[in-house]
């Protein structure tokens, strides 16, 4: 984690960002390979790993990059991955599914400390604050590995400056699949630089659909029956006050978008910031 001595969290993070800003985004100084520095397996299908961060590698919290491995013929097999670490951190973190026969993850699942990962320098994505109008509350709705971009955003001080309350909902099939988001939220609350903001402004709502838990049910159901807002003593969703980011399977994304359209929410983009933005957590039907 970035270590500086200024007591103000925002000043510290701003300083860290400026030092990265001296390198052009996507410039030729960013090498295409990084080294794995930590690996954690959460379930037999989910793991996270950290890498070092090339000095020229810049991104906005919530964006994704192409990462991968070089195959036996020397060709890079790359896939889109949300960057799970915030833009100010001095390492990079990724949260990954394991697809048993997947061209990338059947091999990526075996990465260990010291291994090299391909990291393309260009980053992009739709889950950016610049695409949203100002509002009071920001809802971050994710299923599965769709939590990854929000792992970055909930550690970005800008969201706590722009929104009074941030509501993170992570839906999974089982409790074990919540392990990564539970750890990121707990660590963020205890973090010396951002912990106070996170503790005061972030509501974390983990929900599972195939086991008993403190909160059960699909995100779509929690939204539609108003249980999500009422359980947090918040008013029903209203485009005058609420902004939403969504990252899940195509089915989840479409189902939530349909609910939001009914309530007169408008999708945002860079030329016309709106009330909600959507990104696919993956392409396909899921495993
Ligand atoms: P692929 O051939 O790419 O996928 C095979 C099949 O597995 C897919 O058709 C789909 O049915 C299923 N699948 C793939 N990824 C997932 C997933 N994440 N969850 C459930 N089912 C899946 N994946 C991550 O693990 N973490 C991320 O942060 C991430 N960010 C992404 C961001 C974007 C914008 C997009 C488009 C995809 C992202 N993905 C992410 C998916 C990722 O690009 C790969 O598809 C995944 O790593 C599997 O690669 P593969 O080559 O092993 O299998
Ligand atoms: P369910 O268990 O009822 O299918 P997956 O692992 O398949 O990607 O699912 C992750 C979570 O997303 C699960 O809790 C799953 O619920 C939920 N989910 C899948 N599709 C939808 C959808 N169209 N709308 C809402 N939740 C969904």
Image (spheres, rainbow, N blue to C red):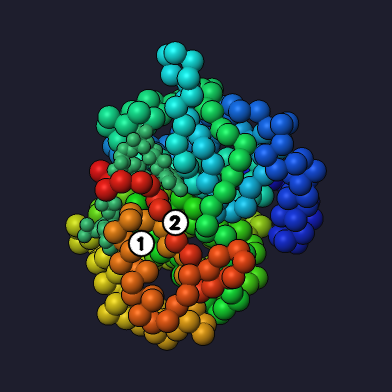
Q: CA distance from mark 2 to mark 1?
A: 8 Å
Above/below status of 147 relative to 271 = above
Residue appearing at x 61%, y 58% in the figure = 156
Tell me residue 182's x, y (percent): 41, 55
Q: Which residue is mark 2?
A: 279
Dot 1, crowdedness within 10 Å: few (<14), some or many (≥20)?
Answer: many
Tell me residue 141's x, y (percent): 41, 64
Mark 2 beta carbon near ligand 1 (under 8 Å)? yes
Residue appearing at x 67%, y 44% in the figure = 58
- Report the quarter where the C terminus lies: top left
Q: Is residue 282 left or right of residue 215?
A: right
Residue appearing at x 37%, y 56% in the figure = 248
Q: Is residue 167 left or right of residue 272?
A: left
Please tell me which residue lies in front, 26 or 60. Answer: 26
Q: Residue 220, located in which quarter of the rendered image?
A: bottom left
Above/below status of 70 relative to 150 = above
Q: Residue 104, located in which quarter of the rendered image?
A: top left
The residue furthest top is 73
First along the sequence among labels 2 and 1: 1
Tell me residue 200's x, y (percent): 56, 72
Assign ligand 1 to one image quadrant: top left
Q: Is residue 253 left or right of residue 127?
A: left
């Amino acid at each position: 984690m970035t270590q500086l001595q200024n007591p103000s969290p925002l000043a510290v993070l701003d300083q860290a960002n400026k030092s990265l800003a001296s390198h052009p985004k996507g410039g030729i100084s960013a090498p295409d390979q990084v080294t794995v520095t930590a690996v954690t397996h959460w379930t037999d299908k989910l793991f996270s790993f950290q890498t070092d961060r090339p000095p020229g590698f810049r991104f906005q919290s919530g964006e994704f990059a192409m990462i991968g491995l070089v195959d036996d013929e020397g060709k890079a097999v790359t896939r889109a991955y949300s960057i799970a670490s915030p833009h100010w951190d001095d390492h990079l973190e990724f949260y990954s599914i394991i697809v048993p026969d997947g061209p990338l993850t059947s091999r990526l699942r075996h990465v260990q400390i010291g291994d090299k990962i391909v990291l393309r320098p260009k980053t992009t994505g739709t889950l950016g604050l610049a695409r949203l109008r100002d509002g009071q509350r920001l809802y971050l709705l994710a299923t599965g590995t769709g939590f990854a971009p929000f792992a970055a955003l909930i550690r970005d001080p800008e969201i706590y400056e722009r929104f009074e309350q941030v509501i993170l909902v992570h839906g999974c099939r089982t409790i074990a699949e919540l392990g990564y988001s539970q750890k990121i939220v707990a660590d963020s609350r205890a973090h010396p630089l951002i912990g106070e903001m996170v503790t005061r402004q972030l509501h974390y709502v983990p929900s599972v659909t195939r086991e008993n838990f403190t909160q059960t049910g699909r995100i779509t159901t929690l939204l539609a029956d108003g249980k999500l807002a009422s359980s947090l003593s918040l008013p029903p969703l209203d485009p005058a006050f609420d902004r939403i980011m969504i990252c899940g399977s195509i089915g989840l994304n479409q189902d939530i978008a349909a609910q939001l359209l009914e309530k007169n929410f408008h999708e945002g983009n860079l030329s016309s910031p709106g009330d909600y933005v959507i990104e696919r957590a993956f392409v396909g039907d899921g495993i």
